[in-house]
Image (cartoon, grey):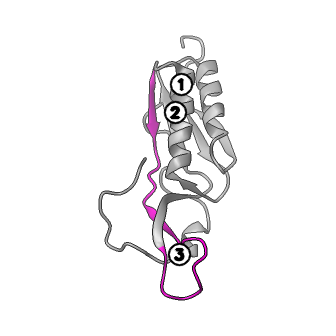
Amino acid sequence: MLQPKRQKYRRPQKGRGRLKGVAHRGTDLAFGSFGIKALQTRWISAQQIESARVAITRYMQRQGQVWIRIFPDKPVTKKPADVRMGKGKGDPYKYVFPAKPGSILFEVEGVPYDVAKEALRLGAQKLPTTTKFIVRRDYDYENA
């Protein structure tokens, strides 16, 4: 599972300001010819990222290459069940990536168009946000 090696603070505040607006960085394809882009603001957990990656690589049958363009570096805390109110903040139990509309989530290269489209569709089903399949602007459909 993806998680940071070390952090400055173990239990930061929620920070709802990170969820406003659209993404300004990480909005263009940088590595592959195909990708999926987030259309909603959502927290994507490390488990969801990993299950999407597994679904994509399984469908591609280990051909081509997959890039994960997001990293869950925001800890989310939770108190155990049957604990009374108060007594401080709970312990971190998962890490999330706050995805904004326009963020590229996954990229794929080295497989045909129809394989990439289906693989990324299967991966997008594992994510809590609606996504859009995108293709590199200079992609050549005839010689692919």
Residue farthest toward the bottom in the current orientation of the protein: 86
Does the residue at mark 2 contact the one at mark 1 (Cβ under 8 Å)?
yes
Query: Does 89 appear in magenta?
Result: yes
Q: CA distance from mark 1 to mark 3?
A: 36 Å
* Residue at x 43%, y 47% (from the top left corner): 1
Q: CA distance from mark 2 to mark 1?
A: 6 Å
**10 Å crowding of disc 3: few (<14), some (14-19), many (20+):** few
Residue 4 falls in image quadrant: bottom left
Q: Looking at the picture, how far across and down is residue 80, in whole percent?
A: 54, 71
**10 Å crowding of disc 2: few (<14), some (14-19), many (20+):** some
Q: Which of the numbered marks, if any, corresponds to residue 15? A: 3
**Residue range (magenta):** 64-90
Total numbered labels placed on residues in the image: 3
* Residue at x 52%, y 33% (from the top left corner): 54
Q: Which residue is mark 1?
A: 58
Mark 3: secondary structure: loop
Q: Which residue is mark 2?
A: 54
Type of amino acid under label 3:
Gly
Q: Nearer the viewer, mark 3 or mark 2?
A: 2
Type of amino acid under label 1:
Arg
Q: Looking at the picture, how far across and down is residue 8, in whole percent?
A: 31, 72
